[in-house]
Image (cartoon, rainbow, N blue to C red):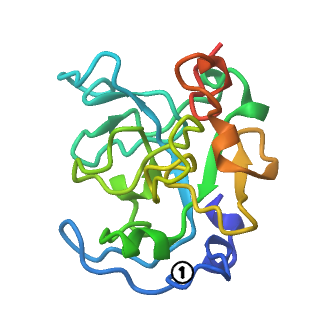
């Protein structure tokens, strides 16, 4: 897509106060600029950490884009389109404001792509990997970002956020509706592109 992107401003939301601001120097160098989007990097912890050679070195990727090559944390780096079972109902990108991440103390949402630039799991907060929780409507509404029903998705537009799906369409939704009941309705988790 890079040849078609004429300005990095497409990655900024006007409501994100940190969008475009230089991020603090992070893990090993310049952390890029704040952006307002994060990739669906959901990983499965069903099998735990799997040691070995690429492409299975780390957690198994069940989202669209991992961070392969970044210390072998998530593999593979991105999914083949044939791997995505329901492209019109599977999330590729979601709004995640840089200002929300930096308010939590993370130098997240860097354009220099790394683990903090994905929405990756449900138990990652507090693990040193940044604010990455996927939405979960069963979480108490009183829980603050990123452990509430909206997870690490920024819902600053009247309780909604913008999502880009794997077939290319975009839609504004209440984030918690993207994963209504992880235990009893796993087939409705729009972050898991492998679901049947």
Residue wearing tag 1: 19
- Where does residue 55 sit, x and y in percent of width and height? 33, 26
Local crowd size for mark 1, using a 10 Å CA cut-off: few (<14), some (14–19), many (≥20): many
Front-most of residues 156 and 192: 156
- Quadrant of residue 28 in the image? bottom left
Mark 1, secondary structure of its residue:
loop
21 left or right, relative to 188: left
Q: Is residue 6 left or right of residue 146?
A: right
Against 32, residue 67 (above or below) is above
Position in image of residue 65 (x %, y %): 50, 42
Residue at 75% in and 32% down:
89
Above or below 54: residue 136: below
Report whether residue 114 is seen.
no
Q: Is residue 1 left or right of residue 128?
A: right
Q: Nearer the viewer, residue 45 or 57?
A: 45
Specify whether residue 15 is in view: yes
Locate the C terminus by quadrant.
Answer: top right
Q: Residue at x 47, y 70 (%)?
A: 100
Asked whether 74 or 43 is in front, the reply is: 43
Q: What quarter of the picture does the N terminus occupy?
A: bottom right
Q: How many marks?
A: 1
């Amino acid at each position: 897509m890079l040849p078609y992107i004429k300005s990095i401003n497409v990655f900024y939301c006007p409501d994100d106060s940190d969008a475009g601001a230089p991020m603090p120097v992070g893990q090993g160098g310049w952390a890029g600029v704040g952006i307002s989007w994060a990739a669906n990097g959901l990983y499965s912890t069903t099998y735990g950490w799997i040691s070995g050679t690429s492409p299975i070195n780390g957690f198994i990727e069940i989202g669209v884009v991992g961070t392969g090559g970044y210390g072998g944390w998530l593999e593979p780096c991105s999914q083949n389109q044939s791997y995505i079972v329901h492209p019109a109902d599977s999330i590729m990108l979601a709004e995640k404001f840089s200002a929300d991440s930096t308010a939590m103390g993370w130098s997240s949402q860097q354009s220099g792509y790394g683990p903090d630039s994905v929405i990756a799991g449900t138990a990652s907060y507090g693990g040193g990997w940044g604010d990455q929780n996927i939405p979960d409507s069963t979480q108490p509404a009183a829980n603050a970002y990123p452990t509430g029903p909206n997870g690490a998705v920024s819902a600053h537009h009247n309780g909604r956020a913008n999502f880009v799906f794997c077939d290319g369409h975009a839609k504004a939704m209440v984030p918690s509706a993207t994963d209504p009941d992880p235990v009893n309705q796993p087939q409705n988790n729009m972050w898991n592109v492998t679901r049947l």
